[in-house]
Image (cartoon, helix red, strand yellow):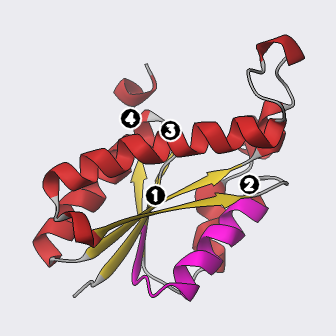
Amino acid sequence: MYKHLLVAVDGSHTSENALAHAIGLAKVEDAELTVVNVANPTEYMALAPEFLQHESYEAAALSEGNTVLDAAVEKAKAALPADKVHRHLLIANKGAKEMAQMLVDYADGNGSDLIILGTHGRSGLMHLLMGSFAETVMRETNLPLLVIRSTAADEG
């Protein structure tokens, strides 16, 4: 049914759960799996400059994104044939909406037939303040979307 899955990872427990689901589904479907991280340099601007170990916010975001991708790809290749596992790093300079749109555009342009991602399931004020990456992906994509919601155990 599915030939090319795309899973978004950010290093959180929730994205780890999404990755596990994606790996299992790719195995059952004998599908390609692309692991994607959307790096956002603006997330590092809140850090004090002395905590920044890189020459720029973009370098910090790229470094962290590659670290997350390396770990995710390693897990995927432990369960799937190496030639079926791919990785991609996207760079967004705005907020969750731009990040989500970039992910949707990448999935559309690269033959994905299912997007898998985790969500923290925030509501109320936290949803208003943080935005919803998953909700924006859902609104913008025409592809099937598998959303893995976090549990209390994932957060603690």
- Gap in angstroms between the C-alphas marked 4 and 3: 24 Å
Magenta range: 98-115
Q: Residue at x 69, y 70 (%)?
A: 102
128 sits to left or right of 120: right
The disc, 1 or 2, on the residue closer to the chain's N-terminal end is 2
Q: Amino acid at mark 2?
A: Ala
Where, quadrant-wise, is the C terminus in this rendering?
top left
The relative height of residue 74 versus residue 102 in the rendered view (above or below) is above
- Gap in angstroms between the C-alphas marked 3 and 1: 18 Å
User: Which disc number belongs to residue 96?
Assistant: 2
- Gap in angstroms between the C-alphas marked 3 and 2: 20 Å
Q: Which residue has dot 4 on it?
A: 151
User: Which disc number belongs to residue 117?
Assistant: 1
How busy is the neighbourhood of tag 3: few (under 14 within 10 Å), some, or many (20 plus)?
some
Secondary structure of residue under mark 2: helix
Question: Is residue 103 magenta-colored?
Answer: yes
> Given this view, does label 4 or label 3 mark the residue nearer the observer?
3
How busy is the neighbourhood of tag 2: few (under 14 within 10 Å), some, or many (20 plus)?
many
Q: Position of residue 24 (x, y in %)?
A: 18, 59
How busy is the neighbourhood of tag 1: few (under 14 within 10 Å), some, or many (20 plus)?
many
Of 87 and 109, nearer the camera is: 87
- Gap in angstroms between the C-alphas marked 4 and 2: 21 Å
The disc, 3 or 1, on the residue closer to the chain's N-terminal end is 3
Q: Position of residue 36 (x, y in %)?
A: 50, 60
The disc, 4 or 2, on the residue closer to the chain's N-terminal end is 2
Q: Residue at x 79, y 43 (%)?
A: 58
Q: Which residue has dot 3 on it?
A: 67
Q: Amino acid at mark 1?
A: Leu
Q: Amino acid at mark 4?
A: Thr
- Gap in angstroms between the C-alphas marked 1 and 2: 14 Å
